[in-house]
Image: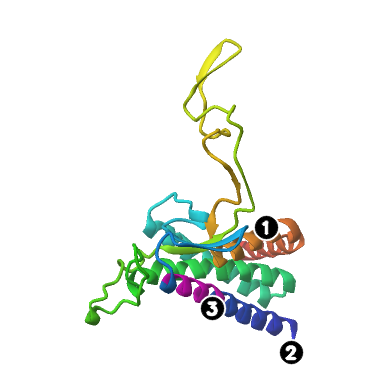
């Protein structure tokens, strides 16, 4: 089996495996936890079920339909670049693995956004069930309006700031200047916590993949850029 076929097979198998792992975890949490339920696994790791409309780690910037459409578009573009790169033998096997991580993570969250609103009942105060209108179990929402399931919570470091620290909004006087103490600075009424966001397996795949791409794959990007410039030059002739 040549390198191209090996990389293609690896990408397909890894992609399917990662998406399956992500969905098994999410469906288990969705059908066994009610919203905001948290179970301590260790002192530094909790399973905490939340849902969000936005991007990785619960961030929200744009409308749901726009966000889902953007995810689908970028996933298709990434998949197309990877397919062409493998076909022309431009990238290393490690690069294929890393890009597949990102693709699998993106698709994992896209599945939530497209299908979960119709697959499940809501999770408010009770465990969600598979939607079945015939049995009176109504879907949570519309197609493409599902919420991403997050559950991994790692409060690795947690401590209280000293009482001498002001509270957000408090009037502070320093060297004759008075100002309201900003909320983005440490405050005595809010503990320090790292790592605060709740995320999922798909978010992890995306984050790890992006960091690895930035740090270790400049040569692969250089080959892709060179191939793009060569193709552009040929098209002009």
Query: In front: 77, or 119?
Result: 119
Q: What residue do we see at 22% from left, 82% from top?
A: 134
Q: CA distance from mark 1 to mark 2?
A: 31 Å
* Residue at position x 59%, y 39% in the image: 160
Task: Locate residue 127: give its quadrant.
Answer: bottom left
Write down the residue under mark 2: 1
Query: Could you tell me which secondary element the residue under label 2 belongs to?
Result: loop
Where is residue 141? Give x, y as percent. 30, 66
Residue at point 59%, 79% (across, down): 17
Camera-nearest residue between 218 and 62: 62
- Please tell me in which quadrant of the rendered image residue 122 appears: bottom left
First along the sequence among labels 1 and 3: 3
Judge left or right: residue 165 versus residue 111.
right
Q: In which quadrant is the C terminus drawn?
A: bottom right
Q: Are marks 1 and 2 in contact (CB under 8 Å)?
A: no
| Nearest-to-viewer mark from 2 and 3 | 3
Of badges 1 and 3, the one in the foreground is 3
Q: Mark 2 or mark 3: name the one nearer the start of the chain.
A: 2
Residue in the picture at 65% in, 62% down: 208
Q: Is residue 208 above or below residue 166?
A: below
- Left or right of 234? Residue 67 is left
Q: Residue 14 location in percent, x, y?
A: 63, 78
Is residue 91 at all visible to an observer of this figure?
A: no
Q: Which mark is residue 211?
A: 1
Q: Is residue 8 above or below residue 181?
A: below
Disc number for residue 20 = 3
Magenta highlight on residue 25: yes
* Magenta stretch: dominant secondary structure: helix
Q: Which residues are magenta?
A: 20-30
**In the image, residue 4 lies in the stretch drawn in magenta:** no
């Amino acid at each position: 089996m040549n390198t191209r076929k090996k990389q293609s097979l690896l990408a397909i198998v890894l992609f399917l495996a990662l998406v399956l792992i992500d969905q098994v975890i999410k469906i288990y949490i969705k059908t066994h936890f009610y919203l905001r339920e948290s179970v301590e696994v260790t002192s530094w790791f909790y399973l905490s079920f939340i849902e969000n409309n936005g991007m990785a780690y619960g961030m929200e910037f744009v409308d749901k339909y726009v966000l889902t459409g953007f995810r689908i578009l970028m996933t298709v573009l990434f998949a197309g670049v990877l397919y062409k790169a493998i076909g022309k033998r431009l990238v290393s096997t490690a690069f294929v693995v890393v890009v597949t991580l990102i693709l699998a993570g993106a698709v994992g969250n896209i599945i939530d956004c497209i299908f979960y609103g119709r697959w499940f009942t809501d999770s408010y105060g009770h465990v969600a069930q598979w939607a079945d209108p015939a049995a009176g179990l109504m879907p949570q929402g519309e197609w493409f309006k599902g919420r991403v399931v997050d559950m991994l919570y790692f409060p690795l470091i947690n401590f209280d700031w000293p009482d001498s620290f002001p509270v957000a909004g408090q009037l502070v006087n320093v060297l004759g200047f008075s100002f309201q103490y900003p909320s983005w600075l440490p405050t005595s009424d809010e503990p320090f916590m790292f790592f605060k966001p709740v995320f999922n397996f798909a978010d992890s795949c995306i984050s790890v993949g992006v960091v690895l791409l930035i740090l270790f794959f400049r040569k692969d990007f250089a080959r892709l850029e060179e191939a793009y410039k060569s193709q552009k030059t040929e098209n002009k002739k």
